[in-house]
Amino acid sequence: MPSLGAAQTRWPVAAWIRLQLPAPPPPTMLLGPPPPPDPPIDGLRPNPVSTDPRRRIWALEEDREGWILRLVWDADDPTFLEAEYRTPRSSGRPSKEKIRAFWEAVRAHTRPLGPLAVIGADPTP
């Protein structure tokens, strides 16, 4: 799964999950195109793509104990949220306990949105 936007850390992605978000309400058409949707989670900040300034990527990075949680949302595809587990060690997979902590951290951020379907993950939940 390619990463969207520019991550603050250059640590490799050791695990990821892609979630289906509820469909946003239809935009109200006034004059001109509708404004882009608001990010679904508090804390997401604009994360511009240097190669395509038209892309509207939003990201949140949290430093956890020895790893980074990165949540990424694309305003042009607002029904998906991607979460990454980044760690400085690229050899081998994270332990089950670390993966469980990663999924719990993702759930803590997405809990206000209700239950979300998992579209893809590595490793699979």
Image (spheres, rainbow, N blue to C red):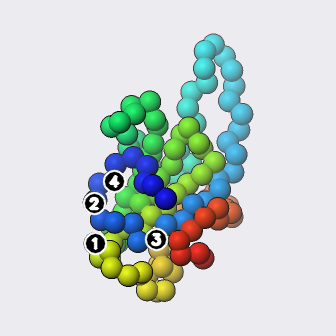
The residue under label 2 is: 10
Report crowding for label 2: few under 14, some 14 to 19, many 20 or more residues within 10 A (C-alpha). Answer: few
- 116 to 97, vertically: above or below: above
Q: Which residue is mark 1?
A: 88
Residue at 70% across / 46% down in the picture?
A: 23
Going by the numbered disc 1, the residue's amino acid type is: Pro
Residue type beneath disc 2: Arg
From the viewer's perspective, is residue 38 above or below residue 22?
A: above
Identify the residue at image location x=37%, y=58%: 61
Which quadrant would residue 13 be assigned to in this image?
bottom left
Badge 2 marks a residue whose secondary structure is loop
Label 1 secondary element: loop
Q: Which residue is mark 3?
A: 15
**How many angstroms separate mark 3 from mark 2 (CA)?**
15 Å
Q: Residues within 10 Å of mark 3 (few under 14, many from 20)?
A: many
Q: Could you tell me which secondary element the residue under label 4 belongs to?
A: loop
Mark closest to the chain's N terminus, 4 or 1? 4
**Residue underneath mark 4:** 7
Q: Earlier in the sequence, mark 3 or mark 1?
A: 3
Give the alpha-carbon distance from disc 4 to disc 3, as whole Å.
15 Å
Task: Kindly identify the amino acid type of the residue bearing the numbered disc 4.
Answer: Ala
First-in-chain label (3 vs 2): 2
Indicate the quadrant where residue 53 lies. top left
Gap between marks 3 and 1, in whole Å? 12 Å
Asked if labels 2 and 4 touch by Cβ distance under 8 angstroms, the answer is yes
Where's residue 32, x and y in %? 61, 15
